[in-house]
Amino acid sequence: MTFTGNGPAIATAGLRKSFGDHIVLDGIDLDVTEGSVFALLGPNGAGKTTMVNILSTLIGADSGVARVAGHDVAGEPDAVRAAIGVTGQFSAVDRLLTGRENLMLMADLYHLRKADRRGRAAELLERFDLVDAADKPVETYSGGMRRRLDLAMSLVGSPRIIFLDEPTTGLDPRSRRTMWQIIRDLVAGGVTVFLTTQYLEEADQLADRIAVLDHGRLVAEGTPEELKRLVPGEHVRLRFAEAAELDLAAGVLGTVVRDDDALALRVPYDGSVHALRALLARLDDASIEVHALTVHTPDLDDVFLALTGRTDSQKVATS
């Protein structure tokens, strides 16, 4: 399926899904622009995977409308499947086969011409840096290699929309960043990526737009910077070498939050250069020496906590 004009690659209206008495999705409206990365965030059980399963035709919605690649998900599932690739939370590769054999099998499932199958497999092995391991059993691959192969298999049919459901879960930081670059390269080539993740840094790094799902409802949507502006708390942290300097600074600055154990003050800050210069000038006029200064701006961790009332249990520390 070919798209033009940066229209919606994915659109939903009033999408609902329940399992028994448990409402998983409660009236979801989405509009995902072609050639972008759209990230769906949410705690465990928020409905992220259910959303992917509906959009990729694996399960049906109870009500509402969903269109993918211009096709109605419920009415034209075959057309949707022809336009998409899906990489789930858990690797779908056959560990007893080699990487090349996995790709050839997928090419067969896509009904590629026999003459094209080997060439497509070779192209993807090269693209995902798997040439040296191409003829080794997948059970010998590292976790990062298996995830790259998994994504390569979802690209055999040259889809224009890729659903990535928790694609870097369990990967080490180096493998995660390799996967990020692969995703960026896909988008640069015009592919639309629908990403679900619990790694907030991942969404911040990759997503053009982010939606936050909690208890079946979208509680916020916007660019990463727009979401960060929803949360107050930008401040300057000043650290001092001696308690006397801390006391003097607290008296001069007035409205601050003290951390006596760390000999630090947290000062409200509006993010402007002018305000930072004025703060430093007040300290300089009072002959107060600051040992260290850091500026804190709200990040997606703060947004996640403010919107869902919980921290991200699977967040990976940055390296």
Image (cartoon, grey):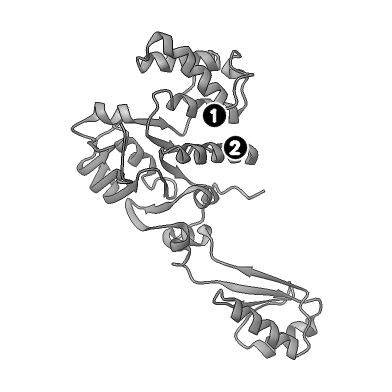
Secondary structure beneath dot 2 equals: helix
Q: Specify the label residue 276 is tagged with.
A: none
Which residue matches tag 2? 178
Residue placed furthest toward the right: 242
Q: Nearer the viewer, residue 246 or 18?
A: 246
Q: Nearer the viewer, residue 238 or 17?
A: 238
Q: CA distance from mark 2 to mark 1?
A: 9 Å
Q: Quadrant of the N terminus?
A: top left
Callout 2 touching callout 1 (CB < 8 Å) = yes
Q: Is residue 297 left or right of residue 303?
A: right
User: In the rendering, at what x and y percent does residue 115 appear?
Assistant: 42, 9
User: In the rendering, at what x and y percent does residue 201 appear?
Assistant: 55, 51
Residue placed furthest toward the front: 5
* In the depicted structure, whether residue 317 falls above or below residue 273: above
Amino acid at pointer 1: Arg
Residue placed furthest toward the top: 114
Q: How many marks?
A: 2
Secondary structure beneath dot 1 equals: helix
Residue 131 appears in which quarter of the rendering?
top right
Residue at 54 percent of width and 29 percent of height: 148
Tell me if mark 2 has few (under 14), some (14-19) or many (20+) residues whose alpha carbon lies within 10 angstroms of its own. Answer: some
N-term mark: 2 or 1: 1
* In the depicted structure, whether residue 58 falls above or below residue 222: above
Q: Nearer the viewer, residue 299 or 206?
A: 206
Residue at 47 percent of width and 18 percent of height: 120
Q: Is residue 1 left or right of residue 64?
A: right
Residue at 43 percent of width and 42 percent of height: 195
Amino acid at pointer 2: Thr
Q: Specify the label residue 148 is tagged with.
A: 1
